[in-house]
Each structure stands twice: as structure tokens, then as C-alpha cells.
Image (spheres, coloured by chain):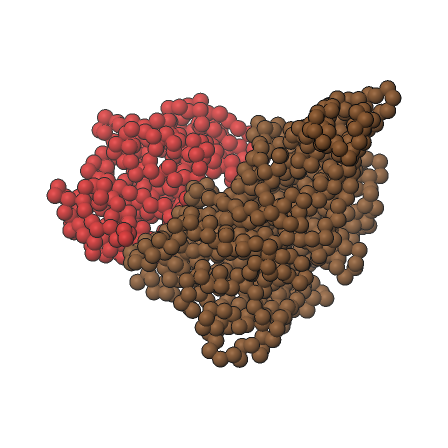
Chain colours: A brown, B red
Amino acid sequence: MEVGKSITRVDAFDKVTGRTKYTDDLCDAGAYVAKIVHSTIAHGKVLSVDTSEAEKIEGVVKIVTCFDLGQYRNYFPTAGHPWSTDVSHQDVADRLLLTDEVKFYGDDVAAVIAENEVAANQALRAIKVEYEEYPVVTDVLEAMKDGAPQIHKDYPNNILKHTSLSRGNYAEAIKEEGLTVVDRWYNTEPVQHCHIENFICYAYAEGKRITIVASTQIPHIARRVVGQALGIPWGDVRVIKPYIGGGFGNKQDILYEPLCAFLSLQVGGHLVKLDCSREETFFANRTRHGIKFHIISHVRKDGTYAARKIEAFSNQGAYASHGHSIAAKGLGAFPQLYPCDNVEGDAYTVFTNRPVAGAMRGYGIPQAMFAVESHTEDVAKIMGIPPIDFRLKNLMPQGYKDAFSKNENYYDTFRQCIEKGKAYMDYDNRVKELSKQTGRVRTGIGMAAFWYNTAVWPISLESSSSRMVLNQDGSVTLQLGETEIGQGADTAFSQMAAEVLGISTDEVHVVSNQDTDITPFGTGSYASRQTYVGGFSIAKTAGLLKQKILDYAYILTNMPPAITDIKNSMIIRTTDNRELISLRDLATEALYSLSDSRHITAESTAQIKSNAYSFGCCFAEVEVDIDMCKAKLTKIINVHDCGKLINPALAKAQVEGGMSMGIGYALSEVQLVDKKTGKVLNDNLLDYKLSTCMDHPHLETAFIENPEPTSPFGTKSLGEPPVCPVAPAIRNAIMNATGVGVNELPLRPEKLYEYFDKAGLLK
Amino acid sequence: MYDIKALYEATSVDDACRLLKEHPGSQVIAGGSDVLVQIREGKRAGKELVSIYMLDELRGICLDADENIRIGSLTSFSHITKNPIIQKYINVLGEAVDQIGGPQIRNIGTIGGNTCNGVTSADSASTLFAWDAQVEIAGEGYRRLVPINEFYIKAGTVDLKEGEIQTAIIIPKKAYEGYKGHYIKYAMREAMDIATTGCSVNVKLSEDKKSFEDVRIAYGVAGPIPMRVPSAENFIRGKEVNEENIEAFAQKVLEDINPRDSWRASKAFRCHIGVVMARKACEKAVKQAGGKVDDRTEL
């Protein structure tokens, strides 16, 4: 068995010894350096760009402004979604390579190409841009008001999209007698991915084609978007994805690949490198959407829901990017977590003059879970029901099936996850102990549950392609369109291939880097689908390869495929387990035979027409120093049911990373924007409070391994889920400690001060 | 790649002062943890740099003939924290500078740079204010001493004239003998952070440990430069050690501190924690000095 083992990740040695080559390591030293002139206003029109002084600087090669696009002035979409051939489902095309219509502070107005970084930066400081300024709006509700500054034409009240859901009859249901109404607002703010490697790419032309090497999660999508942006055939674009230092969704968007390709073409196809600074990563890449939620619950005395309503207002920032998909996903999660017969929901995604929001790990669910699980806690408290009892009474039950996705809850998963979390926390005893506190430093305990989708079907039909080649020594080379972005996908893929082929994982050589000229088509790394989706095509291709191997074994051994198999890299006769020939000898003979030489390879595409619920919960204990307005996380556990674990050690690491991200989201991270100017105030890692290891207690992880019936390997999503329940669990723990429910993220000291002060705790 | 016009490596203090005069507008660089960041941001891009980093005569900590503590300006934060003289007499300074940045910054960053940068948030500054530190400054052929509260002129500006460098920070014996101190850094995370507010308190108790002979309290980020809080100090001097007096002392702080509203934190919030920090730091300092006070923070 290769699946289910904690083998060392296949790229571990190279990564810890520094041998791994990332984009910047691969770029030739002779590359020109490109730097972007970002707007210093948030909304307006560029009247002129004076480059005369900058052009005199030694080492400056060329300066291109928004007025120099010529044939390359094409509006293009940036979202890393698979392209839709249905026009009504295509992403909004609202970006230009460089723009004279400024929509956020930091918009791309011009670019400098120079021989080195110093000259490029000197030129940036010497360029003078003249603007006509328009009024600025950064708040989502302000932007929706009549008379608010209009950011894109054709989108009245700045609403990019509005969707609704309705089940039963809400208006009628709320008339039931004896209902308690809980009506609350919850707010989440934009945060940034903060991957270690900032976005970087380089481009050069060869013949009529352009090659872009980029730190991206989605090479095949990047090829399409560069083609669209430059107005050239998609096949003229080659995108190569080396190892990347994290993406978390920011690189599931097309950032500057098209601009870099365009700039290379402006200097005769010379190699041009565009390396975002950390500051640019904060203000000119993507962020998580800040979403305001309004939830109303009508609750019966017995603690069941009669009717529920949710409104979500998602702040898109200046451009459409992934757009309404995020708020829509949050909205869709709502009626399924706590099913209720009468539900109404509305979600709005709204343009503002903020930096652009896009995909980020969790894709709307961390926001929705903060609102929903904070609200659940509030309702339980008001109803006087212990919060876990209240949840178990209302959570999605075993056997629940969603009509749209056909997802099914096959097991009593929520109860199993919650029991495991309770046991680790010694929950029942702790709750009793903590109820007697009166001091100025108090401890509290809280939890939150969540569910998460694995892939995207049936919103789109997904496919995964893979190729396997039997090498001369019996080892197998594996290629997929699904990408390793630090999560350990290559290792999981290798284990799954080895499992089906009957060889050991170290005999599988996975090609980590994707090259759109060579790699089988795949839409890349997004959602939490790599292992699930890749698993289908790996199972299919490995089956095909195995069949070809056994066919050739028949030539060599006279034993037919019906009674042969591969085990431990040996061809065996299944009737008596006799070893007939080693795979090594078979492979050597296949390629060098004097009578029947074959190159044994297989390639296939799997269509994925299923999806899967992933489940879990988080328990947190905090120590709150009321006077200091500080909450210190002292204990935390995430419990996940992500099906069978392919690699338990990697699964644990994935969860720890997600918990860390959730802790920052809960307690400290927020992208601050000046309301008047739209400028990002904390565009660096000093002022943006990404949590450090000193801010983390031990991160405990646990799993419930209920096999997912739709997956050949019994697996389902784990990439994004760990971040989803952390913030509400911490918020609920703070409420347990102090009695104060803080309904706005992050729960940073100044926010606690405001709430504690209002609650009279600071007197 | 850094935009640096030229780098001159000084071979002695006099040489450094001469180089600074020869190259008007040039910038002194020691560990570089502030200067290089500023060059990258474009603020000091294209400047000539005079490096004093190789001047070992400016490194190290010793007691002078009068038992004043002399800290060479190039002494790194890690060396200050680990130094036996600091640990024995003014351990609080070692604790304060141990909260700067992360380990790499504490290894390269110097106390001279921390103070010459002239910012109110410097973790060493409030403690140096609280200990009545003196700053030693050298010009070509001369040295002069200024009290630290006069060394800071305004935000980002210190009392260094052209051709001068800071050479040492001195804690006079009379300032530390019999005193015990505590520093609280209030920041948004446990490491790699800038102080929202910093508060350093030291106390000298009476022989029976029942009353305050002297208390000194200083803040960072409670005004444009680090500051002492005379109202609170004057109030508590001679008073009995008890919870009420410490609370009143903490409230007195509001008469002097003047934090501003900024996007990093509001004035109201900074004032609130300023008071809490005064109380907590004072309680801790009292305990270290052998006094007793009920700790309200316990359950």
C-alpha cells in the first residue's frame, strides 16, 4: 500500500537544501527589469504622463504608458476560472494592460523597462502623471447608494452581480407564534495571502511565439488569458510554471503575465522580468473579499429554526476578477450547514475603489463561517441552550443530500468530529471550571463547525489529464496539468499512481513543472480539488498503463492479463502469486527487444461529474486580558473529515498551515485602506500583522477518515477547509470568556477595546 | 539591488567624523537594519554612506571608573541582552531590546542606530529615558555628553551635528543604584512588531519596602518622541506602596502623555493602554524591588 503512508514529500530534499529552482532562479541574468508606475489616486482619469526626465536616466531602455497600447488595447478577464464557451458564463473582461481609467490607488498606469532595478526605480520616481480626480468610495454599502461614485459603466449602483436563494416560504413562516428573533450584522475585512514568494514572471519571444515563465497556480489558464489580452492566438503563447513559493489563490488569477509579455514585445522580444515587491503584492495583486453579513433567525423554543434569512454584501474592489463567485459560494453554504425549511438569501458583489479582491483559500467560506458560526453561538446563548447541543440539533444530518450538487452526507460526521474535538479540549469539564471566573484575565472556550465543497462540479464540468511513461528501468514518469504549489500535491499524485501500478512511490518520477507545450491539459491548482480531481485521471491512466504492461507481459511470459497483476514491481500470476518477471526486466526488454519493441505509455482525460462534502470543526481556548484588550490563543484543535488520507503527515501539515492562516484572520490581519484616498496603509509585513510562530500555541490536528464513495481513493478536500472554522471558534471563545461577542474581524486589541468599553468591562 | 552612490568605510571615530564632513549629506550606516530599509523605500536612495560598522572600539559594555554603565553605540541588541553587567544592574534594558524585531534584526541592529533613528517607537528608548541615560557624541577631535531627553529633538531628528556620530550610551551609577525596572511593549503580535506603545518603569523603594523613594516612568509612542511622565512620578514619590496609589499613579499618566490618533491606533485606545501599562509595569517593578502589591491580573 502506497496510499495512506506518511512518506517524505518528493520535493523535500531539494527544497530544504535550496536546490529547488523558482522563477527568479531560472531567469537569465541579462533580463531587462520591468517596474510599474502605479496610480497615486484611487479614481480618475490619466491626463498625461511625462516621461522626459525618466528617459534621461542611464540604463532606462523604454517607458510605455497607458496611451501606448495601440493594437494591444484589449479588455481581458483575469479570474483563474476555466474558460466557458457559454458567453453568459464568461468572466467579466474589464482589465487593460495599462490603464488611463484609474479605479484604485495603485492601478497600472505605465511601465518602465530598464537594464537594472536601480535605474528602473529611479525612473519610477522621475515620471510625472497628471490626473483628473473623481470621488472615491471604499465601503460596500456606500458604493451601493444612489449617487455614489460610479466605478464601471453598465453596473448601476456599482453592483457587479446579485443572486438570491429561496426555500419554502419565509414571509409566512415568521408568523409562527412564540418565535425568538435574532437579528445581527457581522463584518469581515479584506486580508492578503502573504505567500512567501511574491508574484514574479519573465517573458521572451521566439519566432512568432511568446514564452512566459510565471509563479502561477494555473499555467493553462494563463496561456488563454495572455492570448486574450494580447489579441494573439492562444497557441502562440507558452506558459511554464516552475516550483512556486505559495499562492493561496492570489496566483489563481492572472496578475502581470500579460503585461510582462507585452513589455517583452515592446523591446523586440528581449527577456523582460517583472518581479512584484511585497508592497505591490499587497495593493496591486488580489485580496480576500471583505463581506458584510446580515443574518436573521427565527427560533422556536425547542431550539429549532422556523425561518432564516441572510444578506451578504461583498466588496469586490476595483475590478471584477473572480467576482460574484465568492459571495455566491458563501450564500450557497448557508442553507446546507443548518438546513431549515424556510430560507431567504441575497448576495451582492459590489465594485469599490479598493484593491481588487479575488480568490483566496476558502473562497468565501471563511467569511461566511465567521458570520454563520458567530450567529449560531449568539442564538444558542439567547435560547439558553449549550452551543454544542444547539449545533447537533440543527447541523446537516447524516443522509442529507443537496439537490443541486448531489453532494451527500454519508456518515454521522459532524458528531464524530465534534466528539473528537471535545475530548482533546476536555470540553465539558473546562466549560464548568471556566464558568466561575471573575478576574481581569479570563479564559474562554469556543468552537465552530463548517462544511466545504471539494471541486466545482456541477458549476462547470471539470476534467483532469495525466500522462505516464514506463522508463527503461521499470520506473514511471508522471505528468499532470494539476500543479504543485507547495501543498504537496506531487507527493499525493505519486503515491496514488504507485498504488494503482503496484510499484513503490520512489519509482514514480513526477514532473513537477508544467509547460503548456508539453504537459497534458489541466486547469491548475484551485478549489480543494487537486487530489480528488487528479485522482480520477491518475486511476484511469495508471489502469491503461498497467493494461499495456500486462499485455506485454503476456508476450514475455505467455500468461494472459486475466491472471496477471503487478505487485511490488513484479508481474505476478494472481492464481498462485508466483512472480513471473520483474517490471524492470519487462521494461528493459520492451524498449530494447530484438523482436517486439514497444514504448509503453498512457495518457487519458477523466471527466469529473461528482463533488464531495468535506467536514470539520475547530475548538479554541483563549486567555483574555480585559484591561490590555488582548486575546491570547492558548489551545486549538482542528478536526477534519476529508475522507481517506493519502499522506497523513502532509494532511497534518496542510491543516496546520490553514489553522495558522485562520489564526491571523481571527486575531490580527486586516488590509487597512484610507477612506479618503483609497490608499493601502499597511502594505508591508511590519504593519500588516501576519501572525508569527510566537502567536501560535501548539496546533493540534485530528482526522475522521470516512471514505468518500465517489473518489477512487476515498479522498476529498483538505486544502482550503482548515482555515474555515478558526476565526468563529476564537470569537466564540472570547465571548465565552467575557460575555462579549465581537462581530467584526479581526478581533484585534483596538476592536476589543471598543467592544469591552461599550459593554462596560473597562470601568 | 540598493541605490547607493558610494560607501566609505571608516577606520576610526575621527576618520568617520572626517568622512562625514568631506561628504556633506552623507548618511552614517551601522548595522543597516533601518538605513537599508529606508534606501529600499527610496527615502535615502542615491546617498553616500559612511560605514562605522568596523569600528570595534564602539562595541561592548563596561563599568567606567565611577561605575557608570557604558554601552558602546555599536553594541548589538543580542549582546546587550546577554551581557552580565546589563543583567546585573539594568536587566530591564536587556529585556526591552530583546523584544525588537526578530533574532536576525537583534543580531545586526545596534543601540546607537536605534536611538539615532530618532523614532518614538524604538524599544530601547523609553527604558533609556527612564534610566536617565546620557548620550556620548564625538566630532573630529572632541566628545560631548547630552542627556537622552535632550538628544531627541523631534520625530526623526536627534542632536547630531554635521560631522558627529554617537559613540556610547551611559547609564550613571546614581540612576541605577537601588532601582529595579520593568518594560512592557504593547504590540499587535508577539514578535516582529513595532510598539503600539512602550512603557518603562523603574522604582527605588524605601528600606522597609513599604514606600516609594523614587519612581521613573517613560513612554514610547505617547508623543512624537519618547517621554518621561513627571506628573505621575511627582505624585507617587514618597507614597506608600499599595494598589490605590499605583492606580492613582497610573491615572496621573494621562496628564502628560499625548498619543495621537493614527491608523495604527486611536488616541483613546493608546491612552487606555497607557494607563494599564503604567499600573502593570509599576507592579512588576515593585515586585522586583522586593515590595509587595496585590496583583489584580490573577484570577
Name the image quarter holding residue B2.
top right
Q: In this orientation, which residue lies closer to the viewer: A506 or A752?
A: A506
Point 12% across, 43% down: residue: B208
List the single residue furthest toward the left.
B208
List the single residue furthest toward the top.
A594
In the displayed structure, B228 sits above or below A313; it is: above
Point 78% across, 31% down: residue: A550
Using the rendered image of the protein, determine whether residue A599 is visible from the camera's viewpoint.
Answer: yes
Point 50% across, 45% down: residue: A702
Q: Where is residue A205 in the image (x, y as percent from the top left)?
A: 79, 37
Q: In this view, does A322 lie to the left or right of B42?
A: right
Q: Where is residue A258 in the image (x, y as percent from the top left)?
A: 73, 46
Q: Position of residue A582 (x, y in %)?
A: 72, 24
Q: In this view, does A444 lie to the left or right of A217?
A: left
Point 78% across, 41% down: residue: A604
Q: Where is residue A426 in the image (x, y as percent from the top left)?
A: 39, 50
Q: In this view, does A745 lie to the left or right of A233?
A: left
Q: In this orientation, which residue lies closer to the viewer: A759 or A297?
A: A297
Using the rendered image of the protein, determine whether residue A630 is visible from the camera's viewpoint.
Answer: no
Q: In this orientation, which residue lies closer to the viewer: A488 or B273?
A: A488
